[in-house]
Amino acid sequence: MDTVIDLSPLNSIFAEYKDIKGALIPILQKIQNQYTYIPEPAVEIIAEKLNISESEIYGVITFYTQFYTQPEGEYTIKLCRGTACHVKGSKSTLEAIERKLGIKEEETTKDNLFTLRTVACLGACAVAPVMMINDEYYAELTPEKIETIFNKFL
Ligand code: FES
């Protein structure tokens, strides 16, 4: 649910793409960079400015996994679910995180502290299973390590 959102940054985004046809994707990217997600009121404005329906815009948002409709938590967890990490037990790592934080994949904790995402490969297969919390890597994860890591945050 969106409360009060300052939509004034949208003016400069639309000014930048004013004369560019088919600018929906770059506009969505800019908006997401600004807010960490695509706020509902922004979709209404995009529909009006680009003269397309809101359902068409939501179609694009849900088609591309890069776009989110909920605000990102203060910390974004990116847990690798690539092959090497899967073989080394990333599923039990994921379950440990879900248990610890009380959320599922793609959800954000109620206090807005953590968002849990899964990704294909973080490029650190040699030390699988791996996750990142914001810009920091955590390697050779086990459910026990997950406890220790998150206890530092909570
Ligand atoms: S598969 Fe997980 S880091 Fe490459």
Image: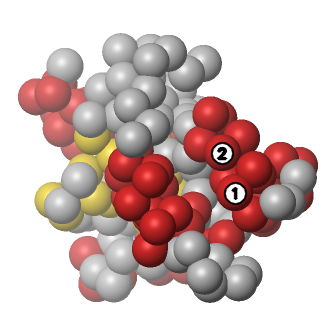
Q: Nearer the viewer, residue 103 or 92?
A: 103
Q: Which mark is residue 45?
A: 2
Q: How was the colour assigned to the protein in this rendering?
A: secondary structure
Residue drawn at x 32%, y 59% is 131
Mark 2, ligand 1, within 8 Å: the answer is: no
In the image as oriented, which residue stretches furthest toward the left? 152
Q: Please provide percent x and percent y for residue 15.
A: 46, 67
Q: Give the structural element (helix, strand or loop) at label 1.
A: helix
Vertical placement of residue 11 versus 87, above or below: above
Residue 18, percent across and down? Answer: 57, 74
The amino acid at mark 2 is: Ile
Q: CA distance from mark 1 to mark 2?
A: 6 Å
- Is the Cβ of the residue at disc 1 closer than 8 Å to that at disc 2? yes
Please give left or right for residue 141 compared with residue 63 in the image. Answer: left
The quadrant holding residue 43 is: top right
Amino acid type at image mark 1: Lys
Quadrant holding the N terminus: top right
**Residue 59 visible, this orientation:** no
Residue 49's label in the rendered image is 1
Q: Is residue 85 above or below residue 20?
A: above
Residue 26, x across and y down, in percent: 55, 74
| Left or right: 29 as drawn, with respect to 149 | right
Q: Is mark 1 within 8 Å of ligand 1?
A: no
- Circle 2 sits in a helix, a strand or a loop, which is it? helix
Say the numbered circle drawn on residue 149: none
Q: Is residue 4 visible in the rendered structure shown here?
A: yes
Which residue appears at 67% of the width and 70% of the height? 24
Q: Quadrant of the C terminus?
A: top left
